[in-house]
Amino acid sequence: MSRLTQSFLARTALIAATALLFLPLGALGQTAAAPASSTPSSSEKTTTSGAKDRWLHVRVVSSDAKGETVRVNVPLELAEAVLPTVNHNRMHDGKVKIECAHMNDVDLKTLVEAVHNAKDGEYVTVQGRENDVRVAKQNNYLIVHVLDKSNGKARNSQVEIKVPMKVVDALFSAGKDELDLVAALHALSGQGDMELVSVKDTDNTVRVWLDSKNVTE
Amino acid sequence: MLLLAKAALGLGGTLVLAGAYTFHEGVIRVDVDEYRDGGSHVHMWVPAAAVPMAMHLAPKRDLKHGAEHAREFLPVARAIIKEMKKYPNAEFVEVLDGADHVRIRTHDGKLQIDVDEPGEKVHVLCPLSTIDDVTRELEANARADAPAA
């Protein structure tokens, strides 16, 4: 091997060794390149989860001076997988015990079955001085509207709940005194984008909705 | 010079292998900054791969003690982490309260918790696979500790 070749090989080996030495530092640098607070805010982020993912979103916005906002985004698949592992108090295997199922001698499950089998229509309409309540079944959705007028007209609070009957059926599918949360979530995952709960009052605005995005609006 | 080059290549190769093994799971990062007199500033980087190794070396008695306390929540934690891995870049919780800002999210397969307050900043970044390993280890210890049925 000529002196020139030897020198060339040695230099190449030295450069390679130096490059190899710096590789882990580069990897470390890459890890460090994403500082904990440098990622864009939720509103800027793009979704990386699959298009089939269904996300349940909860947003609470306080109307006080500080404007407190809470945003919770939960993939339904995650909730379905996690709930059965929670065995605490009345919760077990994704079901929750409701010992008050016979409220004032009303069998809740039978009542739900009756609503399921009934035609669309308004079941409860109460118009009072303090509250307006409306419970109806419309296009396979159970709809509950409550308007609380007890604090004066300027401080009205309004609750709107719209739940697919499939979800209600799944919720009461477990047993007489149990709510099957996992079955309800599973039924919910088959639904399209929709708003489930909306609460508006002078202090807070609460919204619960379902869509395929992993970020809130 | 050739001998020196060979030695450097060998040493470099070994370091690369060691570095690749250490950092393939990423880094656990903890940053705590308290902006007040005497406030602490903690900036800690730990290779995630070192955690399972450290748990193997930790005294079994202490691990069992910890596992016993967390026994009820370990299956829940494992299920959450397992599912979170399916969402490597997602925002799960965000709380904005005036100047306070709390976020819990996943970023490139790591759990990231950011707490920003006017006088304090806490940022934690931990690979989900590391948390999974830790919960597995704790669960194994809890099982070993459980009385036979």
Image: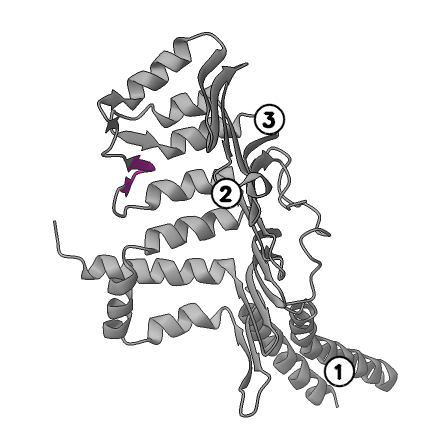
A94 magenta-colored: yes
Q: Tell me which label, 3 or 2, sits earlier in the chain.
A: 2
Element on which disc 2 rests: loop
- Give residue A14's mark: 1
Mark 2 burial class by Cα count in 10 Å: few <14, some 14-19, many 20+: few
* Residue under disc 1 on the same chain as residue under disc 2: yes
Pinpoint the chain carrying mark 1: A
Residue A98 percent coordinates (x, y): 27, 34
Q: Tell me which label, 1 or 2, sits earlier in the chain.
A: 1
Do the residues bearing badges 3 and 2 touch, measured as CB atoms within 8 Å?
Answer: no
Q: Which residues are magenta?
A: A91-96
User: Which SS type dominates the magenta stretch?
Assistant: strand
Q: Is residue B86 left or right of residue A31?
A: left
Taking the spot 85% from the left edge, 83% from the top edge, the residue there is A2
Q: Is residue A3 left or right of residue A122?
A: right
Query: In the image shown, does A147 or B14 lie closer to the viewer?
Result: A147
Q: Given the image, on which type of amino acid does mark 1 rest?
A: Leu
Do the residues bearing badges 3 and 1 touch, measured as CB atoms within 8 Å?
Answer: no
Taking the spot 23% from the left edge, 57% from the top edge, the residue there is B143
Q: Is residue A170 above or below residue B147?
A: above
Q: Which residue is mark 3?
A: A192
Label 1 or label 2, whichever lies nearer to me, is 2
Q: Given the image, on which type of amino acid does mark 2 rest?
A: Asn
Residue B67 percent coordinates (x, y): 28, 64
